[in-house]
């Protein structure tokens, strides 16, 4: 049965200050703090062996910590170059293989950017290439165990990834589900996420268009500094200038009976702020 989960993206300094050295130790450490999710980033490249990933997966299963993975940032399914598209396909395939070792479910992907293309052209290319890679990974049985490709909302105007675009792209196949990065959404829209209704309209749209699978969507949450060109940098939850706040989202999640995995991407307090988010959810 699906359940809501909270955890960090990567290891904060506290992990190392408490004497830990390897991500292999993270599942036990997180479980001791009452957390049950963990995101492993391949953002700057995939450089973990299957053997190490398998050991992390075994530890995660032992402590009921669900591991997700974040694909390399340089994937761009709107790139006009077929050579670069094939590289992006390779990153998706390799990441799914390692996610299997992690015994995980969600593979988070930044889908692409406009570059020199018109936005409509870029989205058209992305749809074509999404269909292509989905055919490939299904043929290779890389979606076994209910794995999902989680397309992420983005924080800058040139990137493809408004929440409407992501929900629409996820209608292409049952293996696609949104990663709602509410810090990105808030940054892109100049601080629009303030009330219950601001969150409700996003998640209700996803449920209306995607059905049951939207109820177990992936969520990234952190406060993010933003400016005229969108996202600038991630902050910690104690920031009082930039949003968004988690409490209205927590109420929406409960009212809609959603069971997402919520990954905290705070600047350097990912685990500590995960506990704050979890406590807010339990309190509301």
Image (cartoon, rainbow, N blue to C red):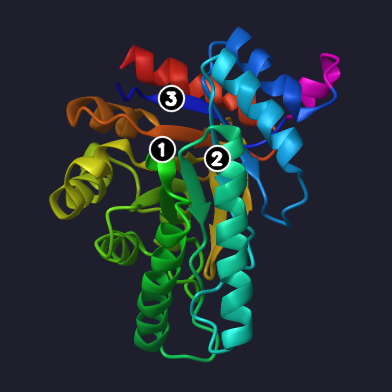
Where disc 3 sits, the SS reads strand
Residue 220 vs 60, above or below: the answer is: below
At x 62% / y 35%, what residue is drawn? 236
Mark 3 vs mark 2, foreground winner is 2
- The label shown at residue 100 is 2
Identify the residue shown where x is 53% and y is 17%. Answer: 35
Residue 265: horizontal and vertical position, in percent?
59, 40
Q: Compared with residue 203, is residue 67 higher up or lower down, i.e. above or below?
A: above
In which quadrant is the C terminus drawn?
A: top left
Q: Earlier in the sequence, mark 2 or mark 1?
A: 2
Rounded to the nearest angstrom, the CA distance separating label 1 from label 3 is 18 Å
Q: Is residue 61 above or below residue 146?
A: above
Mark 1 residue element? helix
Q: Position of residue 71 (x, y in %)?
A: 59, 55
Q: CA distance from mark 2 to mark 1?
A: 8 Å
With 93 as the anchor, is 216 left or right in this view? left
Q: Which mark, residue 5?
A: 3
- The reply to whether the C-beta atoms of the residues labelled 2 and 1 are less than 8 Å apart is yes
Neighbours of disc 2 within 10 Å: few (<14), some (14-19), many (20+): many
User: What residue range appears in magenta?
Assistant: 12-20
Residue designated by label 1: 145
Measure how far apart labels 3 and 2 are at the Cα level.
19 Å
- Residue at 31% x, 66% y: name it: 169
Which label's residue is closer to the chain start, 1 or 3?
Answer: 3
């Amino acid at each position: 049965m699906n359940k809501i989960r909270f955890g960090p993206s990567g290891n904060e300094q506290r992990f190392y200050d408490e004497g830990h050295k390897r991500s292999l130790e993270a599942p036990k450490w997180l479980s001791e703090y009452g957390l049950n999710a963990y995101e492993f980033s391949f953002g700057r490249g995939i450089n973990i062996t299957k053997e190490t990933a398998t050991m992390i997966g075994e530890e995660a299963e032992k402590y009921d910590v669900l591991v997700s993975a974040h694909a390399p940032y340089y994937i761009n399914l709107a790139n006009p170059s077929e050579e670069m598209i094939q590289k992006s396909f390779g990153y998706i395939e390799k990441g799914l293989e390692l996610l299997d070792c992690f015994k995980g479910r969600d593979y988070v992907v930044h889908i692409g950017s406009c570059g020199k293309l018109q936005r409509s052209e870029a989205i058209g290319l992305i749809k074509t290439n999404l269909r292509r890679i989905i055919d490939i990974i299904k043929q290779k049985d890389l979606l076994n165990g209910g794995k999902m490709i989680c397309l992420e909302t983005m924080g800058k105007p040139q990137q493809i990834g408004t929440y409407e675009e992501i929900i629409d792209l996820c209608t292409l196949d049952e293996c696609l589900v949104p990663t709602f990065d509410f810090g990105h959404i808030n940054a892109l829209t100049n601080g629009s996420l303030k009330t219950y209704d601001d969150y409700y309209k996003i998640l209700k749209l996803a449920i209306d268009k995607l059905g049951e699978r939207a109820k177990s969507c992936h969520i990234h949450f952190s406060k993010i500094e933003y400016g005229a060109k969108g996202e600038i940098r991630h902050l910690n939850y104690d920031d009082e200038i930039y949003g968004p706040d988690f409490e209205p989202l927590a109420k929406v999640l409960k009212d809609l009976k959603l069971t997402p995995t919520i990954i905290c991407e705070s600047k350097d307090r990912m685990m500590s702020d995960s506990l704050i988010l979890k406590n807010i959810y339990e309190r509301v």
